[in-house]
Image (cartoon, rainbow, N blue to C red):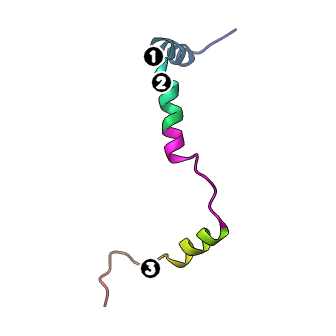
Amino acid sequence: MYESEHTQFIKALKDKNPSIEAGQQQGRSLLWDKAPTTLDEQARQRDSRIAQQPYVYQNKL
């Protein structure tokens, strides 16, 4: 079965350092694996947003 050089490199890297996968899962959990927010929390976040002016680099008059 064919394996590209990239796949071989990744497998060798994971064999040398088995903690890489655990670090990847830990990083993913920090950014992506979040508990769903309630509808009340979503409404609060939507209501507390501050509208951005159309052209952000223009001074406020």
Q: Are marks 3 and 1 in contact (CB under 8 Å)?
A: no
Q: Is residue 31 magenta?
A: yes
Q: Are marks 2 and 1 in contact (CB under 8 Å)?
A: yes
Q: Quadrant of the N terminus?
A: top right
In the image, residue 4 lies at what x, y percent? 58, 15
Residue at 55%, 78% (x, y): give it. 47
Q: Nearer the viewer, residue 27 or 11?
A: 27
| Amino acid type, residue under disc 1 in the picture | Asn
Mark 2 surroundings: few (<14), some (14-19) or many (≥20) residues within 10 A: few
Q: Quadrant of the C terminus?
A: bottom left
Judging by the rendered image, the residue that carries numbered circle 2 is 20
Q: Earlier in the sequence, mark 3 or mark 1?
A: 1
- State the separation of the CA atoms marked 2 and 1: 6 Å
Q: Nearer the viewer, residue 26 or 10?
A: 26
Residue 50 is tagged as none
Q: Which residues are magenta?
A: 27-38
Residue 54 is tagged as 3
Residue 17 is tagged as 1
Which residue appears farthest toward the bottom when viewing the image?
Answer: 61
In the image, residue 60 lies at what x, y percent? 32, 86
Q: Quadrant of residue 38?
A: bottom right
- State the separation of the CA atoms marked 3 and 2: 44 Å
Q: Nearer the viewer, residue 18 or 11?
A: 18
In the image, residue 32 lies at what x, y percent? 56, 47
Q: Earlier in the sequence, mark 3 or mark 2?
A: 2
Mark 1 surroundings: few (<14), some (14-19) or many (≥20) residues within 10 A: few
Q: In this picture, is 33 found above or below 13?
A: below
Residue at 66%, 11% (x, y): give it. 2
Q: In this picture, is 23 found above or below 30?
A: above
Q: In this picture, is 47 found above or below 12?
A: below
